[in-house]
Image: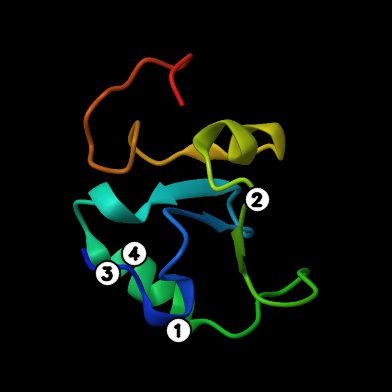
Amino acid sequence: MERPAKFHEYRWLGDRRSQVVYDVDNIDDPALIEELLATDKAEGISGPPWAVFGPDTLAEARNRGYKPYKGNGSGADVDPDAG
């Protein structure tokens, strides 16, 4: 999937509604990202339902309580200590 225009510098995109993080460079279902970015508001969340991380790493997303979607976003299992 090509990175969304407003997130062209970010690989990891988090869904604040479910605390799941997606690897935009390796996702197997781009519709997940498209749906997330098309959503402006979510009940119980102030601001947009998505999040990006600085630094843009899986480790930082995990530090903020996010869990990876299907391993690294591609559906393949990954080493949980890698990142």
Q: Are marks 3 and 1 in contact (CB under 8 Å)?
A: no
Question: Which mark is in front, 2 or 4?
Answer: 2
Q: Position of residue 20 (x, y in %)?
A: 52, 46
Q: Earlier in the sequence, mark 2 or mark 4?
A: 4
Q: Are marks 2 and 3 in contact (CB under 8 Å)?
A: no
Q: Earlier in the sequence, mark 1 or mark 4?
A: 4
Report how far apart the C-alphas of labels 2 and 4 lie in the structure.
22 Å
Q: Position of residue 58 (x, y in %)?
A: 51, 36
| Residue highlighted by disc 2 | 54
Report how far apart the C-alphas of labels 4 and 3 lie in the structure.
4 Å
Report how far apart the C-alphas of labels 2 and 3 lie in the structure.
24 Å
Bin the neighbour count of mark 1 within 10 Å (Cα to Cα): few under 14, some 14-19, many 20 and up: few
Say what secondary structure mark 3 lies in: helix
Report how far apart the C-alphas of labels 1 and 4 lie in the structure.
10 Å
Question: Which mark is in front, 2 or 1?
Answer: 2
Report how far apart the C-alphas of labels 2 and 1 lie in the structure.
22 Å
Give the image quarter of residue 43.
bottom right
Bin the neighbour count of mark 3 within 10 Å (Cα to Cα): few under 14, some 14-19, many 20 and up: few
Kind of residue indicated by mark 2: Gly
| Residue highlighted by disc 4 | 32
Say what secondary structure mark 1 lies in: helix
Q: Which residue sits at x=27%, y=69%? A: 31
Q: Which residue sits at x=37%, y=67%? A: 33
Q: Earlier in the sequence, mark 2 or mark 1?
A: 1
Say what secondary structure mark 4 lies in: helix
Q: Which residue sits at x=71%, y=40%? A: 64
Kind of residue indicated by mark 4: Leu
Could you say which disc has been placed on residue 38 in the image? 1
| Residue highlighted by disc 3 | 31
Kind of residue indicated by mark 1: Ala
Kind of residue indicated by mark 3: Ala
